[in-house]
Image (tube, rainbow, N blue to C red):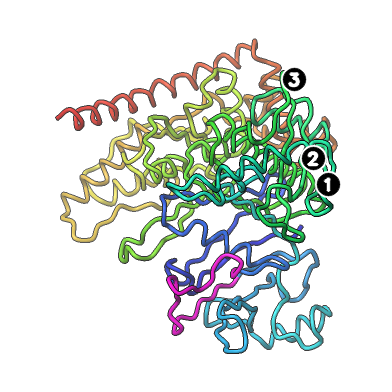
Amino acid sequence: MSRIEKICFVEYKNIVPTSTVEFPRNKDFADINIFIGKNGVGKSSILHAIYGCTNGAVVSDFWFDSAIDQSNKNDKPQYWYEYEHSNVYSGYNKNPQVRMRRIYRETKSPDYWESSRPTPQIGMSWSTSECLEATHKFKIGQKKAERWPKFEMKAKYIDFRHNLTAFDSAIYGRSTLGHHRDNDEAKIRIAKYSKYISEGKPYRNSRKNLHKINLNQEQIKEITKILGKNYTSIQIIYHNFYDVQYEKDVYKVTILINDNTKNYSDAYAGSGESAIIQLVYQIMELNEPTIIILDEPESSLHVEAQKRLVDFLIKFSKKEKHQVFISTHSPFIVENVDINVEAIFKCTPDEENQNKINIQNIDNKEQAFQEVGITRFNGVIYVEDKDTQIVFKTILRNMGLINNYDVIYLNGFSAFCEKVLESGNKFKFLCVGDGDKYKDYGLAYKDDIKSLEEELKRLSESTYKVHKQNKTHSEIITSYRNHINIFKKRVLYIPYKDIETFLLILINIPCDDNSKEKFRDHIYQEYGSHETGNHEAEIVRIINKNQDHPDYHKMENFINDLFVKLKEQVNLIISIYNYKVTN
């Protein structure tokens, strides 16, 4: 499977130089990457660079000089990206990388971009000589290629803000504030030609339908699901009837819709409805894995439609192997992704230079919401493995509390213990470990730094140490004590040795010390493989099938207690917030 693995902005617009963004990969899940932030933080510029990585696309489709927006010719805009190739380049153990530079030449467009020779001086792992050797060995590109060819996949770029239908283009594309003549002429033209569109007849052979597309039932079903309306038929028609002056090969879209109660067109429909119809059709018609780029897909969509759109993108990214990149201001787009699977990046002004933009990976949704000015009073639960996350989320969904938590796994007990100690009281969260990690908190320890350090190490199974620089002996003691107290308050343990023991009890399989291996054997017996998708499906099936089991209720009560504890933290935060507002 080919995909973009990372991109490094060496010198690109207002992004902090040499900023590198890596796009994590999970073969068994959707490939969704989201950039969130306020206006003017470079989200669209990042999408333009990603677009420029793909076959047949260039950044200058979006970024070009004018008399008003003029670049300094001393600047040297460039970035490089790494992609996974469908072939395996044995002997090198690294992916191809392509360097893109904006070139100023008198004989070419001032906005000309081209690939250039790689150099380790800007962080690339390839040298020109290695490229020559590798491309010759694998017969790639030219006979003596000094650089890798561009990424082979094509891009589908959809900007929801500019995705106008023929009607919107005719009405809004030419109107000027205070001047209604253009609008009146457009209305007359639309009224005159609309019957030719619906009947499929040309007008004097110059104005005509290029072609009419009847969406199939699967496409209509997905649109119905996203928008929450009951559609029976949808047609997309490409034509040039509404143009002021006939232009060869310039066709706009009219959409004809039946929703089981009436027939209407995009002129009657909302802009969000028209945009979703076009998006679903375009994505479902893709016949190969594609880089899908969506700029602010929340435009004109109600909250539930935004959430369902994300479900649609996750489904088809996973099914068709698309890699999806999204820029958004919407907390509801972020709400519906699994932060353990999909990647979320925040774009913020740099602390040292407010004119530059930082791109950072986010490890919990709370940070994403704060970035767009939304304060949620939900909680975060960190767990130590993927299976526990699936169990918790399934039970929370059954309890109707799924929207009250982010459940995040951090690959091991020590990893989330360090999260506790690093975060302190900054966020409202709890950590839940396996029962076999429980340790007695009643052990006495002396008032010396070494003993406290050892106690913290014993509890967390990590090498975390408090910062001692510029602190007195007494302050270090206090800091260690505070960390231990935070650990006691934040870390809880499931009432079973591990989550596999709980699952085996539900299906009446005897448990022993090898519960994890025993559960893997059960998966293999049921599905004939250990694929991640089968593993997750079986956990969900076991939980949902055994909701009357006494141990299900035991785990449900434990999770409910977590909810109560987090709610206490939330109420405290709300009280502090209200006090600040009213005082």
**Callout 1 amino acid:** Pro
Mark sitting earlier along the chain (2/1): 2
Q: Secondary structure at mark 3?
A: loop
Spatial CA span between label 2 and label 3: 24 Å
- Residue 194, position in %: x, y? 73, 38
> In the shown orientation, is residue 495 left or right of residue 521?
left
Q: Give the quadrant of the C terminus.
A: top left
- Residue numbers of the magenta segment: 59-80
Q: Which residue is at 82% across, 82% downward?
A: 137
Q: Which residue is at 42% across, 57% downward?
A: 41
Name the main secondary structure of what is drawn in magenta.
loop
In the picture of the structure, the residue carrying the numbered disc 2 is 196
**Callout 2 amino acid:** Tyr
Q: Nearer the viewer, residue 429 or 530?
A: 429
- Residue 274, position in %: x, y? 65, 38
In the picture of the structure, the residue carrying the numbered disc 1 is 202
Spatial CA span between label 3 and label 1: 29 Å
Mark sitting earlier along the chain (3/1): 1
**Callout 3 amino acid:** Asn
Corner quadrant of residue 70? bottom left
In the picture of the structure, the residue carrying the numbered disc 3 is 260
